[in-house]
């Protein structure tokens, strides 16, 4: 029988360097991520009650573009068209996103209307 020498005891792998790397990755991703950038949009939903007076003010957002009371308008002409239909910034404006409409486009329209002073935006399905 051939003998190659005395049996050596098996060494257990050292896990300390791997734990250090995992910890450093955890710290890196925690520092690189962004927290607290969510923002709430002040929107009333249909069915919350309230009165409606004056001419209709319905903004429909479709993938093809914007319509104000069924007439296609550009985003720049939207505020001017609404100013003709409202008496004050607290008049109700109804927003409807059609099938396939982009959520970011809806938020952009809402931001544009809020910046123009319209405060009562109602979102309907």
Image (spheres, grey):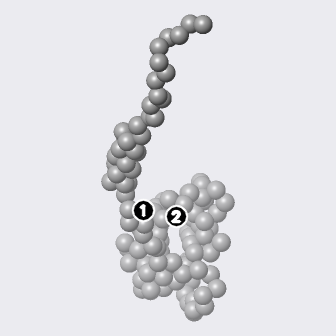
Residue 81: x, y in percent?
47, 71
Circle 1 packing at 10 Å, graded few (<14), some (14-19), many (20+), is few
Q: Name the residue carrying label 1.
A: 76
Q: In the figure, residue 65 lies in which quadrant?
A: bottom right
Residue 45: x, y in percent?
59, 80
- Asked if one can make out residue 69 in the rendered structure from this viewpoint, the answer is no
Question: Seen in the image, is 26 located left or right of residue 45?
Answer: left
User: Would you place residue 51 above or below residue 75 in this image?
Assistant: below
Q: Which mark is residue 91?
A: none
| x 44%, y 81%: residue | 119
Q: Residue furthest front?
A: 1
| x 62%, y 75%: residue | 124
Question: Seen in the image, is 115 located left or right of residue 6?
Answer: left
Out of 3 and 89, give the one closest to the viewer.
Answer: 3
Out of 49 and 83, give the one closest to the viewer.
Answer: 49
Circle 2 packing at 10 Å, graded few (<14), some (14-19), many (20+), is some
For the residues labelled 1 and 2, the Cα–Cα distance comes to 14 Å
Q: Quadrant of the N terminus?
A: top right
Number of callouts in the render? 2
Q: In the figure, residue 97 lies in which quadrant?
A: bottom right
| x 51%, y 78%: residue | 43
Judged by depth in the image, the label closer to the viewer, 1 or 2, is 2
Secondary structure at badge 1 equals helix
Check contact, mark 1 vs mark 2: CB within 8 A: no
- Asked if one can make out residue 6 in the rendered structure from this viewpoint, the answer is yes
Out of 1 and 53, give the one closest to the viewer.
Answer: 1
Q: Earlier in the sequence, mark 1 or mark 2?
A: 1
Residue 116: x, y in percent?
38, 73
Out of 76 and 110, give the one closest to the viewer.
Answer: 110
Q: Quadrant of the C terminus?
A: bottom right
Q: Name the residue carrying label 2.
A: 106
């Amino acid at each position: 029988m051939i003998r190659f020498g005395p049996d050596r005891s098996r060494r257990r792998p050292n896990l300390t360097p791997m734990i250090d790397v995992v910890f450093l990755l955890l710290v890196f991703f925690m520092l690189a991520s962004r927290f607290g950038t969510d923002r709430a949009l002040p929107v009333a939903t249909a069915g919350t009650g309230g009165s409606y007076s004056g001419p209709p003010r319905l903004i429909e957002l479709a993938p093809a573009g914007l319509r104000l009371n069924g007439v296609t308008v550009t985003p720049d002409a939207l505020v001017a068209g609404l100013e003709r239909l409202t008496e004050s910034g607290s008049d109700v404006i109804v927003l409807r996103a059609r099938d396939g409409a982009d959520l970011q486009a809806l938020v952009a329209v809402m931001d544009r209307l809020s910046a123009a002073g319209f405060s009562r935006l109602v979102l309907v399905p």
